Image (tube, grey):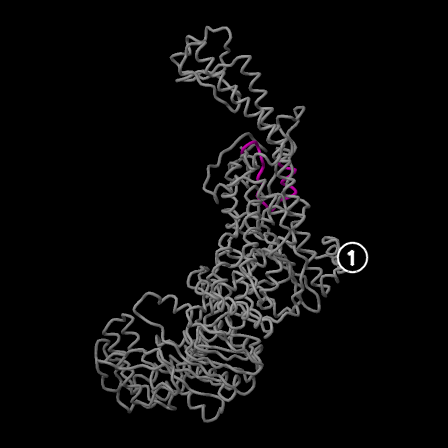
Amino acid sequence: MAQWFALKATQPDALLFFRMGDFYELFFTDAEAAASALDIALTARGEHAGAPIAMCGVPVHAAEAYLARLIRRGFRVAVAEQMEDPKTRAGKAPIRREVVRLITPGTLTEDSLLDAARPNLLLALAVARAGVGAAWLDISTGLFETAALAAGDLPALLGRLDPAEILAGTGLELGEWEGRRGPESLPPPPEAARRRLAEAFAAASVDAFGSFTDVEAQAAAAALDYVRTTSAGALPHLGRPVPRGAEGVLAMDPATRASLELLRTRDGRMPHSLFAAIDRSVTAPGARLLGGWIAAPLTDAEAIAGRQDAWSWMGANPAATTRLRAALRAAPDMARALGRLSVQRGGPRDLAALRAGLAAARGAAEALAGPLPGLLATARAALTPDPALEATLAAALTEPAPLRLDDGAAICPGFDPELDAERGLRDDSRKVLARLQLDYAQRFGAASLKIRHHAQLGYVIEVPAAAAERLRAEPALTLRQSMANAARFSTAELADLDRRIAEAAERSAARERTVFAHLVRLALDQAAAIAAAADALALLDVAQSAAALAQGGRWCRPVLTAEADFIARGARHSVVEAALAGSATAFVPNDCDLSPDRRLLLLTGPNMAGKSTFLRQNALLVVLAQAGLPVPAESLRLGIVDRLFSRVGAADDLARGRSTFMVEMTETAAILHQAGPRSLVVVDEIGRGTATLDGLAIAWAVLEALHGAIRCRTIFATHFHELAALAERLPRLRPHTMRVKEWKRTVVFLHEVAEGAAGRSWGVHVAELAGVPTPVVRRAAALLAALEAEAGPLRAGAALGALPLFAAVGSPTPSAPPDTTNGRLLAELAGLDPDRLSPREALDALYRLKSLLPACAGGDAE
């Protein structure tokens, strides 16, 4: 326990997995937390400070499954291993143990702990007066990138990267990512950071990798220091850091990403996201790269065109693409296998993954024949690392390879003569064992006699209880263990054979470990070439996925321009269309024209008619087009968008004390402050969360700002139909509406967008469709008719007393209006604005109205 206390002191914030034989044991509060999280038995052993020591444990062979559950619950786990072999250790001192690894959400490498289709990023942040430095890496694949940004751009970066763990100072606010904060990070000074970064990659200066700001170098050094700490000083295979600060990426804030559900839906699931709708990849690395393209669309037209050329070539060469897909389907995840091998956590199957991956790379290279566009030509050149490694791995590794090296039989017979010799001695000993069992059975007259291996006793003779009494008298036999239904004996000859077999097996296992380590070194010597081949395979997978998407002819290659164009013909919402596939309902395509002379589209129409779908589908066209992918439309002409804002659907944020309306206004403010002439803004129902007049005024003012001050391409959906009249004052505004038809006293939604303004909202009809009780629907219809008769609630001085406010709920027709002689009461009511009254003012107004009531009612307070 003294040893446990010493190790626990080095990792006080982590659960300590303390290796004891075939189990990882946990003690004290670690045991209590783990037992609760894992639903395993909590026991006690011994005492400390007068109280029993709580403990629980998990088997070593099943530890990964338990670790996965703990990591998902937010725990960090330190693993303390036995550093000595109990069989060969001299003396009676406790076995030496050391913490060999700290497992955290951002430093995972095991497949069972990772999502195959998503990167697992560790993000380090450094703050300076000039802004924020960010460095993110994925130790499972070797990705390592940096960026320098303004503090205000940090939420957008967090939304784009979605890191598993964030290293930052306590003074830096992380917002909704606060739950992913790791231990406090104190970046080294700039010069020390640059020196450490250069030393980590054996370079004289970090300038060899690109131009880094001081805060970028500090963040990168902090990330490397943390990885070293979690890996007991070892550094995994990482690509050289790549500064991404100058790379043009479409800016999208977290609210926009949540609204568009790019990689996951609002509830955190992948189905029904944009990624799920368009993913046709056949490998896990390809899926990860496709997700990266969707999360970070480009603003560089040349880079976008390069991606388009790649999948266009595949669409034009179907035979080559078919051969390529066959090669890709055989490609395992080489990047993650290499990552595990680089930190000594790999097994035979990881080497086998490299073997199969190199073979798949060779097959993919053979499929790409003839002149190729730029990206494909670069990828093909990376697909041909040294063929000697593939040949060596093919000759060395068994098929299928075992999961763990300790399982044995990982190296093929004939590859290493010394290993074959050791295996021969081991196997010959076992043949001798089989002959000895037959000899003993005949000598002692026990046909049921078996020679078995016992973990503590070694090789023993085991006989049923009926024969045990007779064998006890045999002088050559020594009773080792009696059981209810059997007994175990040993002999001097068997003990000697046991020793020789154990020594032969140990020598064989030791030699196999030596051969395996040699193969790992050969692979790591070519780590850069293998990583490049893995990246090339991922790129080819994304390209063939895009080609498969465009294959049916209903997806097109968008035309990108330097102007402020946006002309979509026959466009569709890819996610909704995918959800409707196989049903009797077909998706209705729509056009959208946001050309410079009509850049503001005001969309009116009833609920359920498809306004939100239309808004999102046009925003998703931009994401797909600038990701370099096909788009679901007959055609799309798009001027590069620098910032995309989508506000469709609203929710409160009660945890931070913000109502739905406050969230809406905060997001509207962000748009008005950040949007520019090259931005695209899609917003839905601004102003709906407050009083009608307030909401209309806010929507009106925002519309004017987007039209006249910001001058960006905008789709503005609203139920304030009065705003359509602004087309006379705002020359770039074009009113549009969702078409509906009335049929047999009900409404039919056509889901078509047409120029013009809606005459009504059809809200009562939607309420009826939703199952609102009939009396309530009838009452709403009566109130609506009265409001319309009074020229609507927005008419100045509208007489609320003329409305059927006190009619019976079940009445289908308005009741008679109250006596119009009650002018004083009505005037007082009309002068009140409930949304602007303080509680005290509201109470005073209520008393004032009550004082007027008897006089107006002729003395009858009823």
x and y, in percent, of residue 133 in the image: 67, 64
Q: Would you name the residue on which mark 1 appears? A: 204
The reply to whether residue 340 is visible in this rendering is: yes
Nearer the observer, 89 or 673: 89
Q: What stretch is highlighted in magenta?
A: 4-22
- Above or below residue 636? Residue 239 is above
In the displayed orientation, state which residue is furthest to the bottom.
728
Quarter holding the N terminus is top right
Viewer can see residue 250: no
Q: Which of 593 and 70 is in front in this view?
A: 593
Q: In this view, does 66 lie above or below 583?
A: above
Q: Is residue 589 magenta?
A: no
Q: Where is residue 44 in the image (x, y as percent from the top left)?
A: 51, 33
Give the secondary structure at mark 1: loop
Location of residue 815 with respect to 206 vertically, above or below: below
Image quadrant holding the C terminus, namely bottom left
- Inspect the magenta stretch and tell me whether residue 8 lies in it: yes
